[in-house]
Amino acid sequence: MLRNRCGLVLLTALAPAVWGSTYLVTTELLPPDRPLLAAVLRSLPAGILLLLLTRRLPKGSWWWKSLVLGTLNIGVFLALLFVAAYRLPGGVAATVGAVQPLLVAGLSVPLLGQRLAPRTLAAALVGIVGVALLVLRADARLDAVGVAAALGGAVVMATGVVLSKRWTSPAPLLATTGWQLVAGGLVLTPVALLVEGPPPSSYTGENLIGYGYLGLIGAALAYALWFRGIKALTPTEVTFLGLLSPLVATLLGWIVLGQQLTALQLLGALLALAAVVLAQLRPRRRRAAPVLGDPGACAHGAKEDALGAGSLRDRTRERSGKSL
């Protein structure tokens, strides 16, 4: 159980880690000044591919639920992210977006009946400070519309995460992921055409590689891992993993683009990682009785497993002695 839960957390963490590479791929491989086109080509073809592979369409209420979730998690979120990216420095946008774990924790109280633990609040504040130190610059300028867009993006994504946990789909994971990607892509398409105009008439090989990466890896694979994590873990545990995105983006900028890292950035990275780890820890249980299917906690699961194994050996010896 310990290995299963830690493995699930690590697999889910791959999604925001992949999303952290989006900036590098966009700036180095894609046409300039076409972020909404990139968002459409990232989501819609990937969603159609998953629909063709699964051959499963929504049924009943899942038609409108898929539209709501796809709009929140992908469509509106990426559109607001585009506005924030154009009107704010990246550090400001990332710092405002770092409030998402706190929003998810707050929404989980009325919608999922979960309790807002002081440890979660502390981890959220540490995460915000860590991201700010990691990506925020002293000369960063503020723009009211940009800040509102970044905050709105965090709100809609947080709502989408919580509702994804509340609405459990009976369909396979890849089918549900495909429904949301198609819905989000369809919502984004008219916005992209209105704001950016028709797509370019031709693409280079680098453009095709970049779009292929964003669609297959950044959307189909990453969102499937993300929604799988939401289904198996708590929304709060999952959303804290999103702090890895600015961390990976900064790391790639240092490795690939030769950008400099300061001591404050390194401190911010450590704080962000500390917030992620703190959010994954679960309080020690008072009763050690094993519960079938309980994922356990990474911090205490090994000790409980060892105690359980020892008890099993003792009972086996007792039965052996009685039979003799």
Image (cartoon, rainbow, N blue to C red):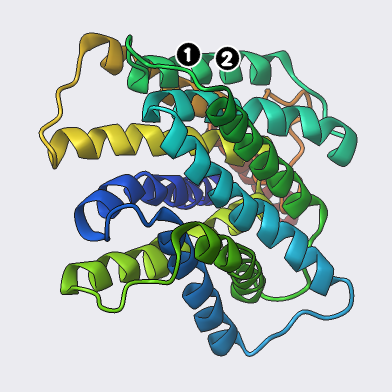
Q: Which mark is residue 69?
A: none
Instruction: Kindly identify the residue that appears in the image at 35 percent across and 32 percent down.
Output: 247
Q: Quadrant of residue 159?
A: top right
Q: For mark 2, does the 10 Å Cα neighbourhood hold few (<14), some (14 to 19), or many (20 or more) residues? A: some
Q: Which residue is mark 2?
A: 125
Q: Which residue is mark 1?
A: 129
Would you say 27 lies left or right of 257 here? right
Asked whether disc 2 touches disc 1, contact meaning CB atoms under 8 Å apart, the reply is yes
- Tell me the element at label 2: helix
Q: Position of residue 200 (x, y in %)?
A: 32, 72
Res 212 visible: yes
Res 221 visible: no
Q: Position of residue 35 (x, y in %)?
A: 41, 54
Instruction: Kindly identify the residue that appears in the image at 73 percent across and 26 percent down.
Output: 285
Instruction: Kindly identify the residue that appears in the image at 68 percent across and 23 percent down.
Output: 283
Q: For mark 1, does the 10 Å Cα neighbourhood hold few (<14), some (14 to 19), or many (20 or more) residues? A: many
Residue 235 to residue 57: above or below = above
Choose between 238 and 158: the one closer to the eye.
Answer: 158
Q: Position of residue 302 (x, y in %)?
A: 53, 35
Identity, as a three-letter code, of the amino acid under mark 1: Val
Identity, as a three-letter code, of the amino acid under mark 2: Leu
Would you say 26 lies left or right of 12 here? left
Q: Quadrant of residue 89?
A: top left
